[in-house]
Amino acid sequence: MRMLVISPQPFFTPRGTPFSVYYRALVMAEQGVEIDLLTYGAGEDVDIPGVRIVRIPRVRFLEPIPVGPSGKKIVLDMLMFLWTIGLLVKHRYSVVHAHEESVFWCRFLKPLFRFRLIYDMHSSLPQQLTNFKFTKSRFLIGAFKWLEDNALRAADAVITICPDLRDYALSTGLSGDRHLLIENSIFDDVRLKKKAAATSGGASVAQAFDPRFPVILYAGTFEAYQGIDVLVRAFALVAVKRPDARLWLVGGTEAQVRRARELVTELGLTDACVLTGVVPKAQALRYTADAAILVSPRLHGTNTPLKIYEQLASGKPLVATRIWSHTQVLDEKVCYLVDPEPQSMADGLLLALADLGRTTERPQNARALYEREYARPVYEGKIRRLLEIVV
């Protein structure tokens, strides 16, 4: 089987790292699928055996490319559309795997080129228009809703990534035999063709944790909805009662790290808080393995973040906010759930710190949940089922 995978986003850059696309392609290639992966020009080249990465021309004046809908992405998606047609004319693909908005043009190209279509639905795009405050236009939101519903009807298979999105897709009339819930739940180290380096921050990627001080670790993006400010303010309350605790914040663009550092300085936490900036994924995984406590302070959202699965698998205590993004996967048996505000988060972190060395019930339950529901063998089985649908 030869497949075209289309990922309309920066591929392996600090502001857009579609690990889900990488793992989809990696596991499908392991199943014998020959893949061309079309993506934006910006980003790092990755090494996926059996996968050829094709990039549109890099348009540097449009960078950095923001998360979510934007005028910049509209221009880049026009180029993606043209490159899609060129690849379809040049090659005979039996399947096209369209990620996010690329399904909008692939749906209309499908009858012309007679391919089977997979819609990899990571979000509801009409919802994104309002969530990212891109537009209030009822016409534009309605047009995206029409396109999304049309794509759901036309696709031969639809992937969703969390229960909330699954329920939404099925509510539109999508039949269950064309749907698969495939969580972004595996996290093998991403193989770059050249070694990546940290792009921002104030700590060496080789810097190790001091074993005298229990480290609370956040690793991920620094977008506003991630709750970094709330976490820092919560840690200020923690530091009063546990001056031995340390907070490490891993990730963020240079501007985001600078703003976070200003808050750290304002709260007098400079000696207790480390901001690393972006580090290679392998280094982030090592930090996760060495941390005492992991935290996900997200403020709102419906899609379960990728890092939650890494945190479940880590065997480390996890403190997470009590929001739907988390609670469709997490409960009090596997983590410490807190409200998305400083005092409640501080209370949860202090409880987790107090439990260190006394109980491992939650981390053990979390690991068992991961192995049962989300581990690589489970993921591979879902990918095999997907390929059976579109063969």
Image (cartoon, grey):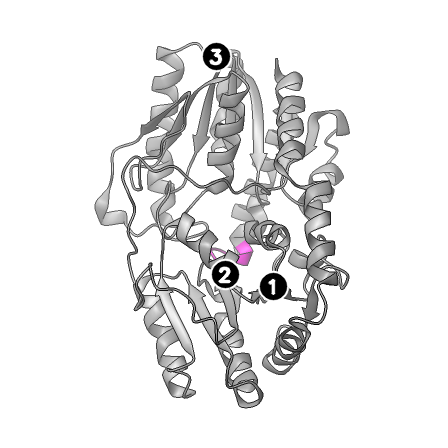
| Mark identifier at residue 290 | 2
Q: Is residue 2 magenta?
A: no
Quarter location, residue 271: bottom left
Disc 1 and disc 3 in contact, CB within 8 angstroms:
no
User: Alpha-carbon distance for marks 1 and 2?
Assistant: 28 Å
Q: Residues within 10 Å of mark 2 (few under 14, many from 20)?
A: some
Which residue lies at the image location 33% right of the left edge and 59% below the top edge? 206
User: Can you say which quadrant of the picture contains the C terminus?
Assistant: top right
Observer-nearest residue: 380 or 94?
380
Is tag 1's residue or tag 2's residue first in the polypeptide sequence? 2
Mark nearer the viewer, 2 or 3: 2
- What amino acid type is highlighted by mark number 1? His
The answer to whether 301 is drawn above or below residue 256 in the figure is above
Judge whether residue 210 can be spotted in this image: yes
**Which mark, by number, is residue 113?**
3
Q: Position of residue 227 (x, y in %)?
A: 52, 69
Nearer-N-terminus badge (1/3): 3
Q: Which residues are magenta?
A: 130-135
Q: Position of residue 385 (x, y in %)?
A: 67, 23
Residue 138 in view: no
The number of discs equals: 3
Image height of 210 relative to 200, above or below: below
- Relative vertical location of residue 266 with respect to residue 225 in this rendering, above or below: below
Report helix, strand or loop for mark 1.
Answer: loop
In the image, taking residue 164 as reference, residue 102 lies left or right, namely left
For the residues carrying marks 1 and 3, which lies nearer the camera in this image?
A: 1
Upstream in sequence: badge 2 or badge 3: 3
Task: Report which residue position mark 1 lands on.
Answer: 300
Which of 213 and 311 lies nearest the eye of the viewer? 213
- The amino acid pointed to by label 3 is Phe
- Looking at the rendered structure, the kind of residue marked 2 is Asp
Percent position of residue 263, x then y? 40, 81
